[in-house]
Image (cartoon, rainbow, N blue to C red):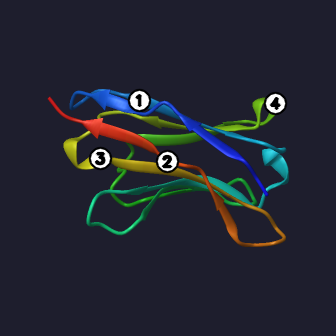
Amino acid sequence: QVQLVESGGGLVQPGGSLRLSCAASESISSLRGMGWYRQAPGKERELVAEFTSGGARNYGEFVKGRFTISRDNAKNTVYLQMNSLKPEDTAVYYCYARRFYPPSPYWGQGTQVTVSS
């Protein structure tokens, strides 16, 4: 199984920025996909950003240009740069990775992001 270690969450003021990191236990270049979901209390888990197997980037509709997903293959790490944060961005952010086989995703433990004044 793929081990995922998330970091970078915390408390920020509205308009501030955070960069989340997700370090994988194996080469991320060989993975089918990798990215981030988030879940707020009482809400369903929703896509934030992801890489497809072809390297394309997909973003959730709510991002509207504020977030950027990137990766460092040498470090086996995927990043999520979050700018212009809003209180509604408050959630637990989960990293995921997906192999070509088996196709079921692996999940990190989650990191809390709180946007509040």
> Residue 29: image x %, image y %?
82, 47
Q: CA distance from mark 4 to mark 2?
A: 23 Å
Q: CA distance from mark 1 to mark 4?
A: 22 Å
Mark 1 or 3, nearer chain start: 1
Q: Residues within 10 Å of mark 2 (few under 14, many from 20)?
A: many
**Corner quadrant of residue 101:** bottom right
Q: CA distance from mark 4 to mark 3?
A: 30 Å
> Which label sits on residue 89?
3
> Residue 114: image x %, image y %?
29, 38
**In the displayed structure, does residue 51 sit left or right of residue 93?**
right
Depth order, front residue of 92/86: 92
Depth order, front residue of 36/6: 6
Q: Residues within 10 Å of mark 3 (few under 14, many from 20)?
A: many
Q: Which residue is mark 1?
A: 18
Mark 1 or 4, nearer chain start: 1
**In the displayed structure, does residue 112 sit left or right of residue 1?**
left
Which residue type carries mark 2?
Answer: Gly
Q: Which residue is mark 4?
A: 74
Quick one: SS at disc 4? helix
Which residue type carries mark 4?
Answer: Ala
Which residue type carries mark 1?
Answer: Leu
